[in-house]
Image (cartoon, rainbow, N blue to C red):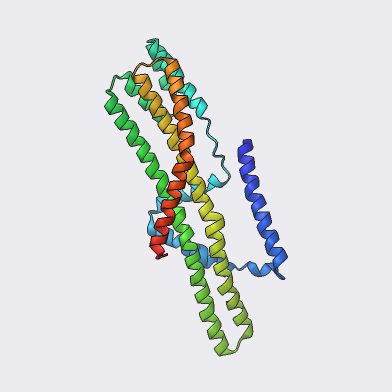
Amino acid sequence: MSFSKYSNLAGVVIGLVFLISAIGLTAENPMAFINIPGLLIVLGGTVTAVLVSVPFKDAVHAFKEARIVIDPLDMNLNSEINKVLHFSKLWFRQQYDQLDTDIGRLKDPFLQRGLQMVRDEHSMEDIMSFLNWKISQHRAKEASVINLFRSMATFAPAFGMVGSLLGLVNMLHGLESGGLASVTSDMAIALVTTFYGLLLANLVFKPIASKLEQRRNQHVLKLSLLSEGIALVHQNRTPSVVRDTLMSFLQVQDNELPQKEAMQKSLYQKNMAAKFGA
């Protein structure tokens, strides 16, 4: 486990410790916040809504992606540049036997397929069309998972309110029958389910969606970098030109990425405001 993974896991643990400490310091009875029926209402309703919204296979895949919370997001793009630079040297020097051998050893299917198309002398238009299609396909796949967790962040508070209404209805029924114990129990469910819904939405589902979005942006940047490198290899540019171009491409993308993220966040907020009539 890398240092970055340790730091992510430590962040999650520290956040949970602060939350539990805050509940313990502000509540006379911290155990009152543990309500299994209320948690089942929120989690069960949210999971059911997700399974109704998307195919079961896609939902299972999205839940597996939740490990992004503790997985590191760092990506060594310099090593990707070195890979492309290695193949550009072989292509420029016409060392085709070594080129074929090294392409066969690649574990990255995107880079392997792109370089193989260069080796097979496909046109630039066909190569770039294929690579752009693969990038779009990857972006769409990641976007579906991100949107699922954003939907869960919307479902959880809604089912928290459902639990609150259920608790209030049961409480009114208990008042008619005169049972004070059942009234307090139903009132606890009514309040705690709203708490669970907001907690899951803002401390679980939204952070997961945010980290998935960051990972998608990094992966798209990596694929765009490799696509640019493959195009340079096809153009038979010198290795020095390939290196300088990819380094400048990386710097430009790093500068533009915060602006793109801000624009995407603003667009998402506008869509949510329009959805709920804000």
Above/below status of 141 relative to 228: below
| Residue 125 drawn at (x, y percent) | 27, 27
Instruction: Give me the residue at 53% from left, 66% from top.
Output: 40
Residue 111: x and y, percent?
A: 40, 27
**Quadrant of the image occupied by residue 185:** bottom right
Q: Is residue 107 visible?
A: no
Residue drawn at 59 percent across, 67 percent down? 36
Task: Check the image and report above or below for 201 versus 94.
Answer: below
Quadrant, the N terminus: top right
Q: How many marks?
A: 0
Which quadrant of the structure image shows residue 230?
top left
Residue 251, percent from left and from top: 48, 30
Name the quadrant containing residue 195: bottom right
In front here: 179 or 111?
111
What residue is rendered at 61% in x and 68% in y? 35
Quadrant for the C terminus in the image: bottom left
Q: Which residue is rendered at x = 64% and y = 36% of the image?
A: 3
For residue 178, side relative to residue 229 (left or right): right
- Residue 225 x %, y %: 43, 29
Q: Is residue 232 above or below residue 49?
A: above
Q: Is residue 96 visible?
A: yes
